[in-house]
Image: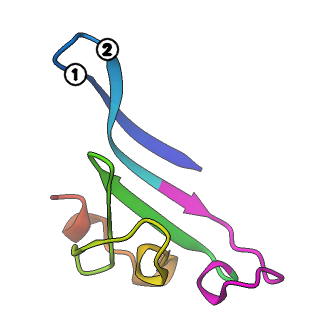
Amino acid sequence: MRYQLETFDKSGKMCVKAGVRVMPGNPYSPHLTQQKPYVKHSVNGKFFDKHGNIVPRKSAEAHIPTNEYNFEKIGKL
């Protein structure tokens, strides 16, 4: 499931300002962080960990377990 906040850039083109993607997890994934349900949260193309710190898009920290995701805290970014 993906939630997106879209807006217009300076040239008038539609772009994604912020996004939250909720993934069900894949128990057979070779990546431990993707084996259980997780969330990826981005704002202006930057990805965040569960504490609101900017992290690399493909890092383990960018895959936040759903039970550790706090929308109210990270949603204020």
Magenta span has 32? yes
- For disc 2, the marked residue is 13
Between residues 30 and 49, which one lies in front from this camera angle?
Answer: 30
Between residues 28 and 4, which one lies in front from this camera angle?
Answer: 28
Quadrant holding the C terminus: bottom left
Residue 25 location in percent, x, y?
69, 73
Magenta span has 12? no
Above or below: residue 16 compared with residue 45: above
Judge left or right: residue 21 versus residue 76: right
| Residue found at the far top of this picture | 12
Judge left or right: residue 52 versus residue 30: left
Secondary structure type for disc 2: loop
Quadrant of the image occupied by residue 35: bottom right
Residue 27 location in percent, x, y?
79, 83
Secondary structure type for disc 1: loop
Residue 19 location in percent, x, y?
39, 47
Classed neighbour count for the residue bearing mark 1: other residues with Cα under 10 Å, few (<14), some (14–19), many (≥20): few
Q: CB atoms at circles 1 and 2 under 8 Å apart?
A: yes
Q: Residue at x 41, y 82 (%)?
A: 61
Judge left or right: residue 21 versus residue 77: right
Give the distance between the C-alpha atoms of the residues marked 1 and 2, in whole angstroms.
5 Å
- For disc 1, the marked residue is 9
The part of the chain drawn in magenta is 21-34
